[in-house]
Image (spheres, helix red, strand yellow):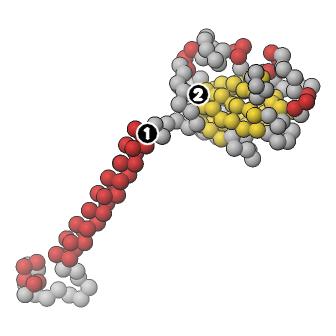
Amino acid sequence: MAESSTNPLGRPLLDGIVPEEVVARTEKRWIKLMAATLLVMMAVIVVTGIASALHPPSNVEVIDPTTLHLQGEFVESNLGTAVEPDGSVTVRLIAEQYDFIPHCVQVPAGTPVKFRLTSADVVHGFLLPNTNVNTMVVPGFVAEVRTRFTTRGEYAMPCHEFCGLGHHAMWAHVRVVPKERFANPTYLERTRCVSQ
Ligand SMILES: [Cu+2]
């Protein structure tokens, strides 16, 4: 009898009790299925990593967060809105506990706008509601997001990565002004929202 080898009591199993060999066979199948799933997931991670598809959000550009204020692209005099030779606009911002620097920037409507951000301390988030702008700002990396504003108005920018006790108050603003009113801005106009 089949049961005698798996059933030490040597008597028929009660209704509803699954024989040991059936349990063992089912468990083996599940182990094989789980191992195959793990292998596929690991292969995906390795392949995407090797193909450089696995990286911090939006950009693979490293920067030393401890010297932002001393040298390079994110020194204070280079922050804010800058008009490029091709007419597009680049906005450079630093995120730090608990503010964006500059706190308010102006950009023209109907113009390609490139935001470049980095963090001076911990991970922050940058989000402009109702636009495609949404990125993490990771210390040591430059995040880059491109967009174009179709209508004028003011966008509130909340930090959407919890960054400490003052996180809830970490907001900045983007003011979109008509293209024809957006002349090459002075230093003050680059780094704050002065009325035009
Ligand atoms: Cu935050």
- Dot 1 amino acid type: Ala
Mark 2 or mark 1: which comes first in sequence? 1
Measuring 91% from the left and 30% from the top, which residue is drawn there? 180
Where the N terminus falls, by quadrant? bottom left
SS at badge 2: loop
Location of mark 2 (residue): 142
Q: Is residue 173 left or right of residue 27?
A: right
Location of mark 1 (residue): 51
Q: Is residue 64 left or right of residue 6?
A: right
Q: Is residue 133 left or right of residue 6?
A: right
Measuring 69% from the left and 40% from the top, which residue is drawn there? 133
Residue 125 location, x and y as percent? 63, 37
Residue 95 visible to an observer of this rendering: no
Residue 117 location, x and y as percent? 64, 28
Residue 57 location, x and y as percent? 56, 37
Kindly indicate the quadrant of the structure image that contains residue 118: top right
Where the C terminus falls, by quadrant? top right
| Residue positioned most to the top | 70
Q: Is residue 97 above or below residue 126?
A: above
